[in-house]
Image (cartoon, helix red, strand yellow):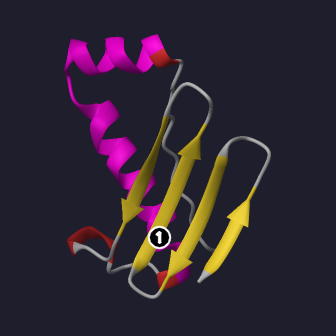
């Protein structure tokens, strides 16, 4: 298992079956899991978690749902998708 920690309150743990992002602060916490899935086949395993999270947030922010918009604004979370193309 590879683990990457940083001073921002989260650590990324990569295992053979997926990735866990551990979120910690004195007031909130949790674990975000990412495993191979239907939409992540296109990416190499080392990047599949990033691919999955970016894809999920792209789809979530594209929904016309005022509750989602309000929740994201309440927590100060904004996501702007971009596509990267290799030359």
Residue in the foreground of this view, choosing between 58 and 50: 50
Q: Residue furthest bottom?
A: 16
Q: Which span is picked out in magenta? A: 46-74
Q: In the picture shown, does residue 32 fall above or below 2?
A: above
Q: In the structure shown, which secondary structural element does the residue marked by tag 1 occupy?
A: strand
Toward the right, the furthest residue is 7
Prevailing secondary structure of the magenta residues: helix
Q: Position of residue 87 (x, y in %)?
A: 65, 74
Q: Is residue 60 magenta?
A: yes
Q: Was residue 76 drawn as part of the magenta stretch in this picture? A: no
Residue at 64% over, 80% down: 2
Residue of label 1: 19
Q: Tell me if mark 1 has few (under 14), some (14-19) or many (20+) residues whose alpha carbon lies within 10 angstroms of its own.
A: many
Q: Is residue 36 left or right of residue 16?
A: left
Q: Residue at x 50, y 30 (%)?
A: 28
Residue visible at 35% across and 17% down in the picture: 71
């Amino acid at each position: 298992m590879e683990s990457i920690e940083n001073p921002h309150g989260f650590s990324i743990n990569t295992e053979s079956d997926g990735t866990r992002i551990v979120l910690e602060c004195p007031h909130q916490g949790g674990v975000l899991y990412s495993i191979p899935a239907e939409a992540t086949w296109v990416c190499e395993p080392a990047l599949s978690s990033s691919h999955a999270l970016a894809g999920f947030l792209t789809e979530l922010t594209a929904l016309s749902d005022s509750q989602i918009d309000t929740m994201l604004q309440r927590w100060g979370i904004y996501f702007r998708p971009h596509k990267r193309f290799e030359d």
